[in-house]
Amino acid sequence: MTDVLHVQTRAYPLHYALDRTVERVVLPGRGEFHPVPGTLASVAYNSEETLEVDLTDIVRAAVSLPEVTIVSCRIRILAAGAVFVAYALRHPTDLRKCDAHELAALDATINRKLREADRALLGEVLAGAKQSGLLTHLVVPPGGAQASDWTEVDPRAVRYNCHFIAREPAWEPDRRVPNLVLGPHCQILLPYTYAWDGDPSPERIDDILTMLEPADIAVAQQSVLVGASVGGLRILTELSRATLGRLEGPEFRRFLDSVWADYHRLDAYRVESGQDDRATYIAARETIGLDGTHDRAEKLLTHVNASLLAESSLRSTQLDGRLNRVAAALTVVASAAFLLDIAAFLLPDVSGQTRAVTVSGVTLLAAGLLGVTIFWSRKRDSDGRPGPQREA
Protein backbone atom coordinates (compact mmCIF):
# COMPACT_ATOMS: atom_id res chain seq x y z
CA MET A 1 0.00 0.00 0.00
CA THR A 2 1.16 3.53 -0.74
CA ASP A 3 1.07 6.57 1.50
CA VAL A 4 -1.80 8.11 -0.48
CA LEU A 5 -5.44 7.78 0.57
CA HIS A 6 -7.96 8.05 -2.27
CA VAL A 7 -11.40 9.38 -1.24
CA GLN A 8 -14.45 9.60 -3.49
CA THR A 9 -17.39 11.64 -2.22
CA ARG A 10 -20.66 11.25 -4.11
CA ALA A 11 -23.56 13.64 -3.61
CA TYR A 12 -27.05 12.21 -4.06
CA PRO A 13 -29.63 15.02 -4.40
CA LEU A 14 -32.70 14.38 -2.25
CA HIS A 15 -35.30 16.68 -0.73
CA TYR A 16 -36.50 15.47 2.64
CA ALA A 17 -36.91 16.10 6.33
CA LEU A 18 -34.84 14.15 8.88
CA ASP A 19 -36.20 12.25 11.86
CA ARG A 20 -33.19 12.07 14.17
CA THR A 21 -35.02 9.84 16.65
CA VAL A 22 -34.68 6.80 14.37
CA GLU A 23 -31.92 4.66 15.85
CA ARG A 24 -31.99 1.56 13.66
CA VAL A 25 -32.51 0.82 9.97
CA VAL A 26 -32.84 -2.79 8.84
CA LEU A 27 -31.68 -3.94 5.41
CA PRO A 28 -33.26 -7.36 4.71
CA GLY A 29 -30.56 -9.91 4.03
CA ARG A 30 -27.75 -7.42 4.68
CA GLY A 31 -28.01 -6.57 8.35
CA GLU A 32 -28.72 -3.18 9.85
CA PHE A 33 -27.10 0.18 10.48
CA HIS A 34 -27.38 2.74 13.23
CA PRO A 35 -27.25 6.45 12.33
CA VAL A 36 -25.46 8.65 14.84
CA PRO A 37 -25.66 12.44 15.18
CA GLY A 38 -22.87 14.48 13.65
CA THR A 39 -22.10 17.99 12.45
CA LEU A 40 -20.39 19.81 9.62
CA ALA A 41 -17.29 20.56 11.65
CA SER A 42 -16.03 23.18 9.17
CA VAL A 43 -19.06 25.37 9.89
CA ALA A 44 -17.84 28.01 12.32
CA TYR A 45 -20.87 30.13 13.22
CA ASN A 46 -24.05 28.05 13.50
CA SER A 47 -23.94 24.31 14.05
CA GLU A 48 -25.14 22.32 11.00
CA GLU A 49 -26.34 18.89 12.09
CA THR A 50 -25.92 15.70 10.07
CA LEU A 51 -26.55 12.00 10.54
CA GLU A 52 -23.54 9.74 10.07
CA VAL A 53 -23.70 6.08 9.01
CA ASP A 54 -20.74 3.68 8.90
CA LEU A 55 -21.43 1.20 6.09
CA THR A 56 -17.91 -0.23 5.85
CA ASP A 57 -18.72 -3.81 6.88
CA ILE A 58 -21.90 -4.01 4.77
CA VAL A 59 -20.15 -2.59 1.70
CA ARG A 60 -17.12 -4.87 2.04
CA ALA A 61 -19.46 -7.88 2.13
CA ALA A 62 -21.25 -6.78 -1.05
CA VAL A 63 -18.62 -4.95 -3.12
CA SER A 64 -15.12 -5.92 -4.17
CA LEU A 65 -12.84 -4.45 -6.82
CA PRO A 66 -9.57 -5.95 -8.06
CA GLU A 67 -6.47 -4.21 -6.72
CA VAL A 68 -8.54 -1.78 -4.67
CA THR A 69 -8.97 -1.98 -0.91
CA ILE A 70 -12.06 -0.37 0.59
CA VAL A 71 -10.78 1.20 3.79
CA SER A 72 -14.03 2.92 4.76
CA CYS A 73 -17.51 3.76 3.50
CA ARG A 74 -19.40 6.52 5.26
CA ILE A 75 -22.80 8.02 4.58
CA ARG A 76 -23.40 11.58 5.74
CA ILE A 77 -27.00 12.78 5.55
CA LEU A 78 -27.04 16.57 5.48
CA ALA A 79 -29.81 18.64 6.94
CA ALA A 80 -30.82 19.76 3.46
CA GLY A 81 -30.70 18.57 -0.08
CA ALA A 82 -28.03 15.90 -0.30
CA VAL A 83 -26.69 12.62 1.00
CA PHE A 84 -22.91 12.10 0.86
CA VAL A 85 -21.45 8.65 0.24
CA ALA A 86 -17.70 8.75 0.91
CA TYR A 87 -15.39 5.88 0.00
CA ALA A 88 -11.81 5.78 1.30
CA LEU A 89 -9.64 3.56 -0.90
CA ARG A 90 -6.09 2.24 -1.02
CA HIS A 91 -4.16 1.14 -4.11
CA PRO A 92 -1.10 -1.11 -4.47
CA THR A 93 0.36 1.20 -7.12
CA ASP A 94 2.32 4.31 -6.24
CA LEU A 95 -0.07 7.18 -7.02
CA ARG A 96 2.70 9.73 -6.53
CA LYS A 97 4.15 8.64 -9.88
CA CYS A 98 0.94 9.64 -11.71
CA ASP A 99 0.22 13.10 -13.04
CA ALA A 100 -3.11 14.89 -12.58
CA HIS A 101 -4.67 13.42 -15.71
CA GLU A 102 -3.60 9.87 -14.85
CA LEU A 103 -5.05 10.32 -11.37
CA ALA A 104 -8.34 11.55 -12.84
CA ALA A 105 -8.49 8.66 -15.32
CA LEU A 106 -7.82 6.12 -12.56
CA ASP A 107 -10.45 7.71 -10.36
CA ALA A 108 -13.07 7.74 -13.14
CA THR A 109 -12.53 4.05 -13.88
CA ILE A 110 -12.84 3.09 -10.23
CA ASN A 111 -15.89 5.29 -9.71
CA ARG A 112 -17.67 3.70 -12.66
CA LYS A 113 -16.97 0.19 -11.37
CA LEU A 114 -17.94 1.12 -7.81
CA ARG A 115 -21.23 2.66 -8.89
CA GLU A 116 -22.12 -0.41 -10.91
CA ALA A 117 -21.21 -2.66 -7.99
CA ASP A 118 -22.97 -0.77 -5.20
CA ARG A 119 -26.02 0.67 -7.00
CA ALA A 120 -28.41 -2.00 -5.71
CA LEU A 121 -26.99 -1.80 -2.20
CA LEU A 122 -27.21 1.99 -1.94
CA GLY A 123 -30.72 1.89 -3.41
CA GLU A 124 -31.69 -0.49 -0.60
CA VAL A 125 -30.02 1.77 1.97
CA LEU A 126 -31.92 4.87 0.81
CA ALA A 127 -35.19 2.94 0.50
CA GLY A 128 -34.62 1.47 3.99
CA ALA A 129 -33.97 4.95 5.38
CA LYS A 130 -37.29 6.10 3.92
CA GLN A 131 -39.16 2.98 5.08
CA SER A 132 -37.86 3.36 8.63
CA GLY A 133 -38.93 7.00 8.77
CA LEU A 134 -35.37 8.35 8.85
CA LEU A 135 -36.12 10.31 5.65
CA THR A 136 -39.59 11.87 5.75
CA HIS A 137 -41.60 14.29 3.60
CA LEU A 138 -39.68 13.14 0.54
CA VAL A 139 -40.25 15.34 -2.52
CA VAL A 140 -39.51 13.85 -5.96
CA PRO A 141 -39.81 15.48 -9.40
CA PRO A 142 -43.32 15.22 -10.86
CA GLY A 143 -43.76 13.20 -14.01
CA GLY A 144 -42.03 10.11 -12.64
CA ALA A 145 -42.68 7.83 -9.70
CA GLN A 146 -44.57 9.20 -6.74
CA ALA A 147 -42.74 9.61 -3.45
CA SER A 148 -44.48 6.51 -2.10
CA ASP A 149 -43.07 4.47 -5.03
CA TRP A 150 -39.61 6.07 -5.01
CA THR A 151 -36.74 3.59 -5.12
CA GLU A 152 -33.52 5.39 -6.13
CA VAL A 153 -31.96 8.66 -7.18
CA ASP A 154 -31.63 9.10 -10.93
CA PRO A 155 -27.94 8.22 -11.56
CA ARG A 156 -27.64 11.14 -13.99
CA ALA A 157 -28.17 13.52 -11.07
CA VAL A 158 -25.32 12.15 -8.94
CA ARG A 159 -22.10 14.17 -8.90
CA TYR A 160 -18.86 13.40 -7.07
CA ASN A 161 -15.44 14.68 -6.09
CA CYS A 162 -12.22 12.72 -5.92
CA HIS A 163 -9.60 13.56 -3.31
CA PHE A 164 -6.02 12.39 -2.87
CA ILE A 165 -4.66 12.85 0.64
CA ALA A 166 -0.89 12.65 1.14
CA ARG A 167 1.94 14.29 3.02
CA GLU A 168 3.36 17.11 0.90
CA PRO A 169 1.65 16.17 -2.39
CA ALA A 170 3.73 17.09 -5.42
CA TRP A 171 1.19 16.77 -8.22
CA GLU A 172 0.99 19.71 -10.61
CA PRO A 173 -2.46 21.17 -11.36
CA ASP A 174 -3.70 21.29 -14.92
CA ARG A 175 -2.68 24.61 -16.47
CA ARG A 176 -6.30 25.37 -17.39
CA VAL A 177 -7.36 25.42 -13.73
CA PRO A 178 -7.66 29.09 -12.70
CA ASN A 179 -5.24 30.42 -10.16
CA LEU A 180 -7.53 30.96 -7.20
CA VAL A 181 -7.06 31.69 -3.53
CA LEU A 182 -7.46 28.44 -1.57
CA GLY A 183 -7.45 27.47 2.03
CA PRO A 184 -4.34 25.75 3.35
CA HIS A 185 -3.64 22.10 2.55
CA CYS A 186 -5.79 22.13 -0.64
CA GLN A 187 -4.79 22.05 -4.28
CA ILE A 188 -7.24 21.83 -7.21
CA LEU A 189 -5.70 19.54 -9.83
CA LEU A 190 -8.71 19.46 -12.17
CA PRO A 191 -12.40 20.29 -11.75
CA TYR A 192 -13.74 17.79 -9.18
CA THR A 193 -10.17 16.54 -8.48
CA TYR A 194 -8.27 17.70 -5.38
CA ALA A 195 -4.98 17.04 -3.63
CA TRP A 196 -4.79 17.60 0.13
CA ASP A 197 -1.74 17.92 2.33
CA GLY A 198 -2.60 15.87 5.39
CA ASP A 199 -2.16 12.65 7.30
CA PRO A 200 -3.66 9.87 5.13
CA SER A 201 -4.06 7.40 8.00
CA PRO A 202 -7.48 5.67 7.78
CA GLU A 203 -7.84 6.10 11.55
CA ARG A 204 -8.25 9.83 10.89
CA ILE A 205 -11.20 9.39 8.51
CA ASP A 206 -13.43 11.71 10.57
CA ASP A 207 -10.88 14.52 10.39
CA ILE A 208 -10.30 13.83 6.70
CA LEU A 209 -13.99 14.08 5.84
CA THR A 210 -14.17 17.35 7.75
CA MET A 211 -11.19 18.66 5.75
CA LEU A 212 -12.98 17.79 2.49
CA GLU A 213 -16.27 19.50 3.39
CA PRO A 214 -15.76 22.80 1.50
CA ALA A 215 -15.30 21.09 -1.87
CA ASP A 216 -18.01 18.51 -1.15
CA ILE A 217 -20.61 21.14 -0.23
CA ALA A 218 -20.01 22.74 -3.64
CA VAL A 219 -20.53 19.43 -5.43
CA ALA A 220 -23.69 18.83 -3.37
CA GLN A 221 -25.11 22.10 -4.72
CA GLN A 222 -24.15 21.01 -8.22
CA SER A 223 -25.99 17.71 -7.75
CA VAL A 224 -29.13 19.52 -6.51
CA LEU A 225 -29.20 21.68 -9.64
CA VAL A 226 -28.45 18.78 -11.98
CA GLY A 227 -31.14 16.66 -10.31
CA ALA A 228 -33.68 19.45 -10.77
CA SER A 229 -32.69 19.83 -14.43
CA VAL A 230 -33.01 16.08 -15.01
CA GLY A 231 -36.51 16.17 -13.53
CA GLY A 232 -37.41 19.20 -15.65
CA LEU A 233 -36.18 17.52 -18.84
CA ARG A 234 -38.30 14.46 -18.06
CA ILE A 235 -41.38 16.67 -17.80
CA LEU A 236 -40.60 18.49 -21.05
CA THR A 237 -40.16 15.14 -22.83
CA GLU A 238 -43.55 13.93 -21.61
CA LEU A 239 -45.20 17.18 -22.61
CA SER A 240 -43.61 17.13 -26.08
CA ARG A 241 -44.82 13.57 -26.66
CA ALA A 242 -48.30 14.34 -25.33
CA THR A 243 -47.76 11.60 -22.75
CA LEU A 244 -50.34 11.40 -20.02
CA GLY A 245 -48.67 11.43 -16.64
CA ARG A 246 -48.52 12.92 -13.19
CA LEU A 247 -48.04 16.46 -14.47
CA GLU A 248 -49.58 18.86 -12.01
CA GLY A 249 -48.60 22.50 -11.66
CA PRO A 250 -48.94 22.68 -7.84
CA GLU A 251 -46.83 19.55 -7.43
CA PHE A 252 -44.09 21.00 -9.61
CA ARG A 253 -44.21 24.23 -7.60
CA ARG A 254 -43.65 22.26 -4.39
CA PHE A 255 -40.74 20.48 -6.02
CA LEU A 256 -39.21 23.79 -7.09
CA ASP A 257 -39.70 25.21 -3.61
CA SER A 258 -37.79 22.26 -2.13
CA VAL A 259 -35.02 22.53 -4.74
CA TRP A 260 -34.36 26.23 -4.20
CA ALA A 261 -34.72 25.98 -0.42
CA ASP A 262 -32.12 23.21 -0.23
CA TYR A 263 -29.82 24.86 -2.76
CA HIS A 264 -29.74 28.16 -0.89
CA ARG A 265 -29.44 26.46 2.47
CA LEU A 266 -26.30 24.74 1.18
CA ASP A 267 -25.20 28.09 -0.28
CA ALA A 268 -25.21 29.52 3.24
CA TYR A 269 -21.95 27.62 3.72
CA ARG A 270 -20.14 30.59 2.17
CA VAL A 271 -21.00 32.73 5.20
CA GLU A 272 -21.23 30.03 7.89
CA SER A 273 -17.86 28.31 7.34
CA GLY A 274 -14.49 29.39 8.68
CA GLN A 275 -12.26 31.68 6.66
CA ASP A 276 -9.92 28.99 5.30
CA ASP A 277 -12.76 26.62 4.43
CA ARG A 278 -14.72 29.46 2.85
CA ALA A 279 -11.85 30.23 0.49
CA THR A 280 -11.66 26.60 -0.62
CA TYR A 281 -15.44 26.43 -1.07
CA ILE A 282 -15.58 29.56 -3.25
CA ALA A 283 -12.65 28.33 -5.34
CA ALA A 284 -14.25 24.90 -5.76
CA ARG A 285 -17.59 26.29 -6.91
CA GLU A 286 -15.86 28.60 -9.40
CA THR A 287 -13.76 25.75 -10.80
CA ILE A 288 -16.77 23.47 -11.40
CA GLY A 289 -18.85 26.33 -12.88
CA LEU A 290 -21.59 26.17 -10.27
CA ASP A 291 -22.97 29.65 -10.99
CA GLY A 292 -23.33 28.81 -14.69
CA THR A 293 -25.17 25.61 -13.78
CA HIS A 294 -27.44 27.68 -11.55
CA ASP A 295 -28.33 30.06 -14.39
CA ARG A 296 -29.02 27.25 -16.87
CA ALA A 297 -31.12 25.31 -14.38
CA GLU A 298 -33.16 28.40 -13.51
CA LYS A 299 -33.90 29.11 -17.20
CA LEU A 300 -34.84 25.49 -17.85
CA LEU A 301 -37.12 25.20 -14.82
CA THR A 302 -38.78 28.52 -15.68
CA HIS A 303 -39.56 27.14 -19.15
CA VAL A 304 -40.89 23.90 -17.63
CA ASN A 305 -43.15 25.91 -15.34
CA ALA A 306 -44.53 27.91 -18.30
CA SER A 307 -45.13 24.69 -20.27
CA LEU A 308 -46.96 23.11 -17.34
CA LEU A 309 -49.17 26.19 -17.02
CA ALA A 310 -49.99 25.95 -20.75
CA GLU A 311 -50.75 22.24 -20.39
CA SER A 312 -52.96 22.93 -17.39
CA SER A 313 -54.85 25.58 -19.40
CA LEU A 314 -55.31 23.14 -22.29
CA ARG A 315 -56.63 20.44 -19.99
CA SER A 316 -59.03 22.90 -18.39
CA THR A 317 -60.32 23.89 -21.85
CA GLN A 318 -60.79 20.25 -22.81
CA LEU A 319 -62.57 19.54 -19.54
CA ASP A 320 -64.88 22.51 -20.09
CA GLY A 321 -65.65 21.17 -23.58
CA ARG A 322 -66.55 17.75 -22.23
CA LEU A 323 -68.71 19.28 -19.50
CA ASN A 324 -70.49 21.41 -22.12
CA ARG A 325 -71.21 18.30 -24.20
CA VAL A 326 -72.56 16.47 -21.16
CA ALA A 327 -74.76 19.45 -20.25
CA ALA A 328 -76.06 19.69 -23.84
CA ALA A 329 -76.79 15.96 -23.90
CA LEU A 330 -78.67 16.14 -20.61
CA THR A 331 -80.69 19.07 -21.95
CA VAL A 332 -81.72 17.07 -25.04
CA VAL A 333 -82.66 14.02 -22.95
CA ALA A 334 -84.69 16.16 -20.55
CA SER A 335 -86.48 17.80 -23.48
CA ALA A 336 -87.32 14.39 -24.95
CA ALA A 337 -88.72 13.22 -21.62
CA PHE A 338 -90.79 16.41 -21.41
CA LEU A 339 -92.19 15.81 -24.92
CA LEU A 340 -93.17 12.28 -23.97
CA ASP A 341 -94.97 13.60 -20.86
CA ILE A 342 -96.87 16.13 -23.01
CA ALA A 343 -97.80 13.43 -25.54
CA ALA A 344 -99.05 11.15 -22.78
CA PHE A 345 -101.17 13.99 -21.36
CA LEU A 346 -102.67 15.13 -24.66
CA LEU A 347 -103.24 11.64 -26.08
CA PRO A 348 -104.45 9.58 -23.16
CA ASP A 349 -106.72 7.24 -25.13
CA VAL A 350 -104.76 6.52 -28.31
CA SER A 351 -103.94 2.99 -29.41
CA GLY A 352 -100.76 1.18 -28.44
CA GLN A 353 -99.48 1.45 -32.03
CA THR A 354 -99.85 5.23 -31.99
CA ARG A 355 -98.06 5.39 -28.66
CA ALA A 356 -95.22 3.27 -30.03
CA VAL A 357 -94.89 5.49 -33.09
CA THR A 358 -94.92 8.62 -30.92
CA VAL A 359 -92.30 7.25 -28.52
CA SER A 360 -90.11 6.07 -31.41
CA GLY A 361 -90.39 9.42 -33.17
CA VAL A 362 -89.48 11.39 -30.09
CA THR A 363 -86.60 8.99 -29.34
CA LEU A 364 -85.20 9.26 -32.87
CA LEU A 365 -85.55 13.05 -32.75
CA ALA A 366 -83.76 13.17 -29.41
CA ALA A 367 -80.99 10.88 -30.69
CA GLY A 368 -80.54 13.05 -33.77
CA LEU A 369 -80.41 16.24 -31.75
CA LEU A 370 -78.00 14.60 -29.31
CA GLY A 371 -75.66 13.56 -32.15
CA VAL A 372 -75.77 17.00 -33.75
CA THR A 373 -75.11 18.66 -30.39
CA ILE A 374 -72.06 16.48 -29.62
CA PHE A 375 -70.67 16.88 -33.15
CA TRP A 376 -71.07 20.65 -33.07
CA SER A 377 -69.50 20.86 -29.60
CA ARG A 378 -66.48 18.76 -30.63
CA LYS A 379 -66.03 20.78 -33.83
CA ARG A 380 -66.12 24.06 -31.94
CA ASP A 381 -63.59 22.72 -29.39
CA SER A 382 -61.17 21.76 -32.14
CA ASP A 383 -61.48 24.97 -34.23
CA GLY A 384 -58.35 27.06 -34.10
CA ARG A 385 -56.18 24.42 -32.40
CA PRO A 386 -53.45 23.12 -34.74
CA GLY A 387 -52.03 19.64 -34.67
CA PRO A 388 -53.50 16.37 -33.38
CA GLN A 389 -55.89 16.58 -30.48
CA ARG A 390 -55.92 14.32 -27.47
CA GLU A 391 -58.09 13.93 -24.43
CA ALA A 392 -56.50 14.78 -21.12
Image (cartoon, rainbow, N blue to C red):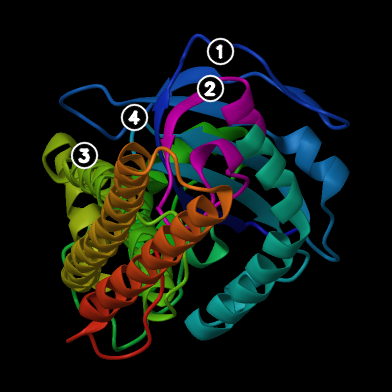
Q: Earlier in the sequence, mark 3 or mark 1?
A: 1
Residues under numbered marks 3 and 1 in contact, where contact means CB atoms less than 8 Å apart: no
Which label is found at residue 134? 2
Q: Residues within 10 Å of mark 3 (few under 14, many from 20)?
A: some
Q: Helix, strand or loop at disc 3?
A: helix
Q: Amino acid at mark 1?
A: Val
Q: Are marks 3 and 4 in contact (CB under 8 Å)?
A: no
Which is nearer the N-term, disc 2 or disc 3?
A: 2
* For residue 105, above or below residue 73: below
Marks 3 and 1, how far apart at CA: 24 Å
First in sequence, mark 4 or 1: give its number. 1
Q: Residues within 10 Å of mark 4 (few under 14, many from 20)?
A: some
Q: Percent position (x, y) of residue 154? A: 54, 59
**Front-most of residues 143 and 83:** 143
Q: Which residue is mark 4?
A: 41
Q: CA distance from mark 2 to mark 3?
A: 20 Å
Q: Magenta residues, as a range?
A: 128-153
Residue receiving disc 3: 265
